[in-house]
Image (cartoon, grey):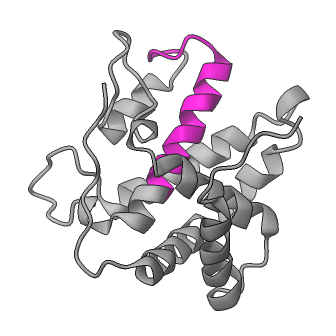
Amino acid sequence: MQAESHPLEPFFHQAVRNSYEGTLGLHDPEVTGYVAHLLCEFSEAENLYKVRDEAGNPIEDLSEMILAADPINGAAPSFDAERAARKHIGDYALFVAGMYPGAVDTNRGRRQRHPSLQELINAGKESYFIVSQFNLFEYEQEAPLFARLSDRFERCILGLTLVREQLGPRKPLQLPPQVN
C-alpha cells in the first residue's frame, strides 16, 4: 500500500524541479522528490523540531541537536536513533539555509541560537554523510541518495533559495515557534 502524498507535494515538486533541473542543471529526480517531500514535511511547524532532549522537549539549537544525536556521548539511545536524528539535522539545515536566510546568524558577535550559514552547511553535509554510511539492510537502498545530498548540499541550498524566490513573499520570513 502506497503512503498518501501531501496535498502540496505536486506543487512543491514542480517548484523544486524548475529550480534544480531548469536553473541549476541538477538532474536527479530522487533528490528533487526528496526535497519536495521535505518542503511538505516542514510546511507543518511541529515537524521542524523533531530532535528531542532527554525530557522529551524539542531542541531548537543546532549544536544541541548534534549532541543529542550522538549515541555514545549524547541522548540517542541507539544507532538507529542517531541515524534518524542526523537525517533530521540534515533536513533542518537544508531547509533553514535555503528557505529562511533571516534565521542565519550574520553577526558573529551575537549568538542567540542562530547558526551561521557555514555552520548549517557543515552540519547538513556531515549529517547526510553519516546517514549515507548506514548502508546495510533496510537502509541500503536510500544510502546513495544521502551521499548525493551531502556532496551537493550547497547546490541544494541554492536551489531552495530559488524556490523561495519563486514562491514569494519578498519580505524576510521568520521561523515558526516550537510546538511542545
Q: Give coordinates of residue 56: x percent, y percent.
A: 38, 14
Q: Quadrant of residue 48?
A: top left
In this image, 40 relative to 96: left or right?
A: right
Q: Quadrant of residue 57?
A: top left
Number of numbered labels in the structure image: 0
Front one among 167 and 34 = 167
Q: Residue at x 31, y 78 (%)?
A: 169
Q: Give coordinates of residue 58: x percent, y percent.
A: 34, 26
In this image, 151 relative to 158: left or right?
A: right
Q: Give coordinates of residue 67: x percent, y percent.
A: 41, 27
Considering only vertical position in the picture, is 145 above or below 177? below
Front one among 152 and 57 = 57
Magenta-colored segment: predominant secondary structure = helix
In this image, 4 relative to 47: left or right?
A: right
Task: Pick out the residue farthest to the front.
Answer: 7
Q: Residue at x 23, y 71 (%)?
A: 172
Magenta region: 72-94
Q: Quadrant of the image for the C terminus?
A: top left
Q: Quadrant of residue 130?
A: top right
Considering only vertical position in the picture, is 7 above or below 47? below
Front one among 91 and 169 = 169
Q: Residue at x 22, y 77 (%)?
A: 171
Question: Is 86 covered by the magenta stretch?
Answer: yes
Front one among 35 and 68 = 35
